[in-house]
Image (cartoon, rainbow, N blue to C red):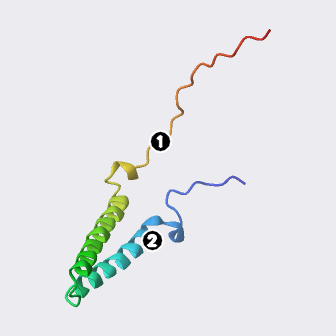
Amino acid sequence: MRKRFRLNPPLENNPIRHTHKIKAELRQIIKQLREDLGDVTEAKAKALFETSAEVLTDLVDAFEDFEKTTEAAWRVVPRTAPPRQRTFHASRR
């Protein structure tokens, strides 16, 4: 029996389902980091928390780009075989 190709992966294998889940968790961490800024008095700790929130925000943006395939790196490009190069073999004696 011949296998049929699926246009959409099964729900449990769908990467978008997973990216939504990860984005929600990242947003929760971002929220916590920003809330904790008010509780921390040390300047270096404040900088760490704010920088971490900014980095995670950029990561959320990367997940969104993946979902929308707006970045070239996330687009599916058909693979083509590279041009064949001629090889020269040493003559046999």
Q: Can you say whether 7 is above or below 37 in the image?
A: above
Which sits earlier in the primary sequence, circle 2 or circle 1? 2
Residue assigned mark 1:
78
Residue 18, numbered circle: 2
Query: Which quarter shows the C terminus?
Result: top right
Residue 22: image location, x then y, percent? 40, 74
Q: Number of numbered discs present?
A: 2
Please name the residue shown 33% across and 62% down the image. 62
* Amino acid at dot 2: His
Residue 10: image location, x then y, percent? 53, 67
Q: Secondary structure at mark 1?
A: loop
Q: Can you say whether 5 is above or below 86 in the image?
A: below
Residue 18: image location, x then y, percent? 45, 71
Q: Can you say whether 61 is above or below 72 in the image?
A: below
Asked which quadrant contains residue 70, the reply is: bottom left
Please name the residue shown 64% across and 16% down the image. 88
Please name the residue shown 61% across and 54% down the image. 4
Residue 72: image location, x then y, percent? 35, 48
* Amino acid at dot 1: Pro
Asked which quadrant contains residue 30, the reply is: bottom left
Query: Which quarter shows the N terminus?
Result: bottom right
Q: Secondary structure at mark 2?
A: helix
Q: Nearer the viewer, residue 89 or 65?
A: 89
